[in-house]
Image: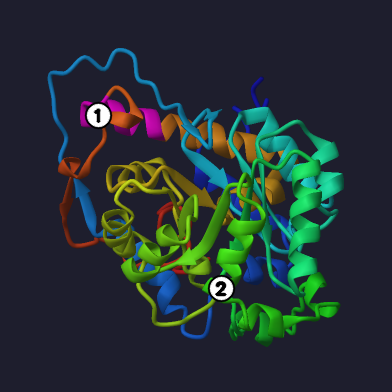
Amino acid sequence: MSSGLEDRYQTLHEIVKAARTTLAPGPWDYLVGGAETETTLRRNRLAIDSLAFRPRVLRDVSKVDATSSFLGRPVRIPVMMAPIGSIESFTPGGGATAAQASAEFGVPQMLSSVCNPGLEAVAKAADNFRIFQLYVRGDETFVDDHVRRAVANGYTGFAITIDTASYSRRERDLARRFVKPWRQRATGFDYQAGFTWNHVKRFKDTWPSVPLILKGIATAEDARLACEHGVDVVYVSNHGGRQLDQGRGSLDVLPEVVKAVGGRARIIVDGCFQRGTDVVKALALGADLVGMGRMPCFGLAAAGAAGCVRMLELMEDEIRIALALLGVDRVGALDASYLYPAPPVTWPSITSAFPLIEGPDY
């Protein structure tokens, strides 16, 4: 089924603009902001914009297949709705509304452990491809309890975020005095800071049949260690530029991680991917799935579940067009030969992928 919003939103920038109009200043800045100088956030976009395409021509692209699969399940396009804490700041139904969009369109949703209405209620909201993401806020019993609940409620994989040993200074939030709902009641941060490779080993020993995803890998060294510990999915991420400032862009990190993994695990990447061409670049460099966090939230804020579905419909159109114009008839045919280093043509910002929106950060 379609979103029914084809006439209302014909471009992605219209969805972003509608979200900006709808959201109050606090939630908007939380959504678009990064840590401190926001350098890592900008480098996410810079890394994407510093690659050009090398298209091939005179190939049969009369039929282009943008579908893929992940963890043994089909996906309509190789995009995942990445975990967003306090997603209820952007749509009243929170994670449940996002799940409905995930099911309607046919892409996986990774549910954050710090959003409402919780993993059981989200599972009941839609029969979707869902993965659970945990911030470690307790001991081994805390972790195991969440694994049991996730398995019992049909979550296909279990992700642990590992780049939050300390909570960052997100100056847009601080300047607005905006405190996310989950932060008001959060405890147990020391458990996250104390989480180590020994805990990863214990997880795999205790839950060998549960696909484990480590979210927040940013080096080849840690990608290699993840594989040595039997991790099923390496998730390349810098938290959308919201944790460590002055970091590298995710797409700059991806090639060394792909090489270090060497096919031993599947690979997800996120970090300001906002257009179909962005997704295609990541796939060409070896990612299996591209996580999008802000884009689903723009859709949700603009028009609820239907707005999110419409965003994904437009993303699908852009991906198919990019594949066809590259001379590629399926996702699996992509490789790095279709890319070439090139200087960016715009100053990177959170909305620089949408040139019809005025202002560097809108």
**At x 41% / y 61%, what residue is drawn?**
228
Tag 1 or tag 2, which sits nearer the N-term?
2
State yes or no: residue 317 in magenta: no
The total of numbered circles placed on residues is 2
Residue nearest the observer in this picture, 37 or 212: 212
The answer to whether one can see residue 193 in this image is yes
Badge 2 local density, few (<14 within 10 Å), some, or many (20+)? few
Q: Position of residue 26 (x, y in %)?
A: 72, 73
Left or right, 185 with respect to 35, comes to right
Which amino acid type corresponds to the residue marked 2 in the rendered image? Asn
Residue nearest the observer in this picture, 164 or 230: 230
**At x 41% / y 34%, what residue is drawn?**
318
Spatial separation of the CA atoms under disc 2 and disc 1: 47 Å
**With respect to residue 108, does 297 lie above or below?**
below
Q: Position of residue 157 (x, y in %)?
A: 62, 46
Which amino acid type corresponds to the residue marked 1 in the rendered image? Leu
Magenta part of the chain: 319-328
Q: Which residue is mark 1?
A: 325
Question: Is the magenta region chiefly helix, strand or loop?
Answer: helix
Q: Position of residue 252 (x, y in %)?
A: 29, 64
Give residue 198's mark: 2
- Mark 2 or 1, which is nearer the eye? 2
